[in-house]
Amino acid sequence: MQQLQTLQGLLAQSPADVLASPDRALAWVRDVHHAYLTFDRHNAGAAEAAEFKLAAILWRARVLTRLTASPPPWVNRKPRALSEIVLALGVFLPPERRRTVESLVGGGDEFARILASQGLRSRQHPQFHAVAGPGAALDIVANRSSAWTFRRWKHDVAFSQYRFDGDGVHYRGVHFRPGDVLLTNVNLDGNGVYTSLSDPKGFSSHSAFFAVLEDGARRYPVVIETYEKGVRPVPLNVFLGPRFSAYTEVYRHRDLSTDNTTAFNSAAGAIFDRVAGYNFDTEDEDRSYMSCTSVGRFLHRDAGLRPAVTRSRIRNPRIRENLSRLGYEFFNIFTPVDYLLDDRFTCCGWVDNGQFSNLLARELVDREFRRQFSERSLRPEKFPFRYPINRWALRQIRARTTVGRAIGRIIGFDSDSLPKGPDDVIAVITLAEARIGRSITKVKGVLDKILRDLEDVEMQQLITHPRVRTAVADSLVLPWLPPD
């Protein structure tokens, strides 16, 4: 409890007072980050961890805004001091903020150093390229299929260019080692529909796992993750980029050794060719179909590490009843937050892509979706018209009928790659995500306007703001969850 009080006190300090001195400002940033890194998440619980995650993200954004939009007098005299604070904050700078920082620090080596810390290369400063990482992008987005398989993208040597250190790499301010767990809020609105229904409520919508794959003499730092058709490796810089993810925290097994990391890499290199599809049953021992969390359970086990224990449950009686109507009864559910709550794992860093309004909008809409799902009776007959069509198509594909094979060729699935789980859930999940995603977009717009108008607004003020509450309630009207 003392750790949480310390963190609360640091976050509550007045930016105007602390930022008046560059030394105090830098010490403040480092103190907040140390307190955030070391507070006892296992005993604090999921709700406290999620609250402080959002509070810390908002705090970083506010500090950065104050330093750049209305720079303190010392900034012009001590541009290097500003560089050190920006580096310590570690927030990804959008293009407009990047131009402001460049003008304040004077460009040159100082600005190239900041760019490198963000995973961005400066052609004029190759000495920072290893820190910056590949400086290359791929058209891969969260959960959706992509033409960029490992067999294809490994031919680009850039994706092997990182600052290696022993069995891991330094990137975006974090020292990654094989076996590390990435608890990630991906940029797919509606992706939290699944994790919002369990207890404790989800800390992040996704989990994935760092590994280093080898091909000949080259080593490729990757993130092993599930997507709609199974398991794949994504280049580390792509996964952590602002297009793919909004925020990631990194957790490491306390018993991790070099022997474990070697075994983990070996297991990770084989897994994505062996997994046929996604699995809605997180406790299933079938290695042909996996959920995002069970990937880590299998890989940690193969690496000789005791895997995380399932702590999450779907406990609410109405939620269980509603899910049962869709054939879903996997009520022991291994969710990403279980890694955070397991005392065998400890937080060792984070990557903040500066997308606070995205994160808060998703959190507020997910909470409202959970409230409705836990208080109302599901009416599947009121699902969108595509739902019965999807369900029929799924059954045709599973039965391997001629029509099913034709449908599979069109949508890119066959009977093997379809997710393992209730067809009723699979038929409606993307429709629900899309509907929830539209609500998130509307709420984000309201949050962005309030944040522009009220520079010093606190998170609780945002959550309880009448315009935000109205936007959440008015935008998330679900015909299939009518008020009782």
Image (cartoon, grey):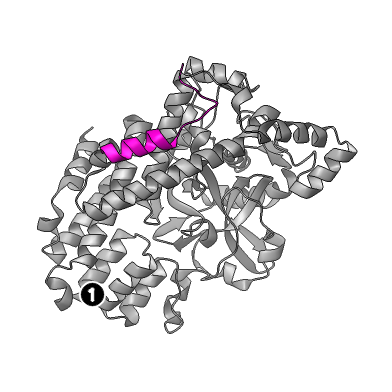
- Disc 1 element: helix
Check disc 1 and report the residue beneath it.
80
Please say whether residue 468 is one of the residues in the magenta stretch.
Answer: yes
- For the residue pair 451 and 417, the one nearer the viewer reads as 451
Left/right of residue 176 with respect to residue 53 in the rendered view:
right
Dot 1 amino acid type: Arg
The magenta-colored residue range is: 465-484
Q: Position of residue 51 (x, y in %)?
A: 32, 38
Q: Position of residue 360 (x, y in %)?
A: 36, 43
Counting the numbered discs, the total is: 1
Residue at image coords 78%, 31%: 395
Residue at image coords 39%, 51%: 349
Q: Is residue 92 above or below residue 132?
A: above
Left/right of residue 349 with respect to residue 438 in the rendered view:
left
**Can you say which quadrant of the picture contains the N terminus?**
top left
Q: Position of residue 357 (x, y in %)?
A: 36, 49
- For the residue pair 457 and 380, the one nearer the viewer reads as 380
As drawn, the residue found furthest toward the right would be: 402
Left/right of residue 169 with respect to residue 327 in the rendered view:
left
As drawn, the residue found furthest toward the bottom would be: 124
- For the residue pair 39 and 433, the one nearer the viewer reads as 433
Residue at image coords 29%, 48%: 56
Residue at image coords 35%, 32%: 47
Q: Is residue 36 above or below residue 2?
A: below
Q: Is residue 213 above or below residue 298?
A: below
10 Å crowding of disc 1: few (<14), some (14-19), many (20+): some
Please say whether residue 104 is one of the residues in the magenta stretch.
Answer: no
Task: Tell me, yes or no, if residue 35 can be seen here.
Answer: yes
Q: Position of residue 255 (x, y in %)?
A: 47, 42
Task: Tell me, yes or no, if residue 348 can be seen here.
Answer: no
